[in-house]
Image (spheres, rainbow, N blue to C red):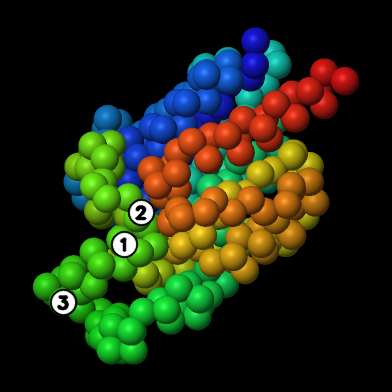
Amino acid sequence: GRRPVVALHGGPAFTHNYILPLQLLADSGHAVIFYDQAGCGESTFVKDPSKDAPWLLTIPYYVEELSRVTATLGLDCGSGYHLYGSSWGTVLAQEFAATKPFGLCSLILDGALCDAQVYIKTQWRDRISTMPTYTQRLLRHLEDTKAYDTAAYRVLEAALGLHFTTRLVPRPACWYAALNGLNQAIYVGMQGASEFTLGGQLEHWSITERNAQLRVPTLVLAGEFDTMSQECQQLVVDSIPTAWPLVTIPRAAHCKLIDEPQLCVEAIARFLFAIEQLAQA
């Protein structure tokens, strides 16, 4: 049969539920394996990670966790597996691939970044700049004063989310399930207070230079209205010698498996079919 796909959710700590449309790949013969990274969702929930589990606020922990998952499922022996990552999951997927794990056959990076500063700078330049001037200025003021716990910031975050995070109306049950399983303490500690700022462990993260060592076929999926700009995601493509040309999903924002699930899964299925045909040749 076809090789399984291991799916990495975003956040960090946002849970697997919002990427459940990826299970449509089963129609192409691929088993899809979802798991909640430790500290959120259906895994052990840690209310105060900085005190009780500080390793949940580090990138290396999640790389080790993923290696344990693949080993426990026996995926690191036999015919191998494909690795899908969404948002933060693309960070984890690239870090994991950099360890050159046995059995990894390809990467699918959905809403990807390889340089945190390029991501946040181009988000403001190419995405937030499309909002009305007053909205931009208000957001900048709230960011500069770190007024994240205010009614104004929450309204702005929700409004921007409808433009750039997921544009589907109404939002599906799997989106709200992911929200219900979110661990805000891990999310803030790792990436900052919202999707429109950057702090924590990821603020100065970059894997651009290390990606030059990767040799697995890689598909990068961008959304037309993605929080990750085209430049941000093209940089990922350019940094990986074996990456395919960037694929842009029309009408979709960052969580494109929710906005345009069929288009995403068709693009991924075509990629996987080609990779597996080449492996058999």
Residue found at x 45% / y 26%: 23
Counting residues from the start of the chain, the first of labels 1 and 2 encountered is: 1
Location of mark 2 (residue)? 166
Location of mark 3 (residue)? 152
Q: Amino acid at mark 1?
A: Gly
Q: Is residue 97 left or right of residue 17?
A: right
Camera-near label (3 vs 2) is 2
Counting residues from the start of the chain, the first of labels 3 and 2 encountered is: 3
Local crowd size for mark 2, using a 10 Å CA cut-off: few (<14), some (14–19), many (≥20)? many
Q: Look at the picture and state if 141 lies above or below 54.
A: below
How far is disc 1 from disc 3 in space, using C-alphas? 14 Å
Q: Secondary structure at mark 1?
A: helix
Q: Badges 1 and 2: C-beta atoms under 8 Å apart?
A: yes
Q: Amino acid at mark 2?
A: Thr
Counting residues from the start of the chain, the first of labels 1 and 3 encountered is: 3
> Foreground residue, 278 or 114?
278
How far is disc 1 from disc 2 in space, using C-alphas? 6 Å
Residue 161, which numbered label?
1
Q: Look at the picture and state if 204 lies above or below 63.
A: below
Q: Secondary structure at mark 2?
A: loop
* Place of residue 35 in the rendered image (x, y in percent of width and height, measured from the top left): 40, 29
Q: Residue 128 lies in what quarter of the image?
A: bottom left
Residue found at x 87% / y 20%: 281
> Foreground residue, 79 or 76?
79
* Place of residue 142 in the rendered image (x, y in percent of width and height, measured from the top left): 25, 82
> Foreground residue, 241 or 190?
241
Q: Badges 3 and 2: C-beta atoms under 8 Å apart?
A: no
Q: Secondary structure at mark 3?
A: helix
> Foreground residue, 194 or 245?
245
Camera-near label (1 vs 3) is 1
* Residue closest to the far top: 1
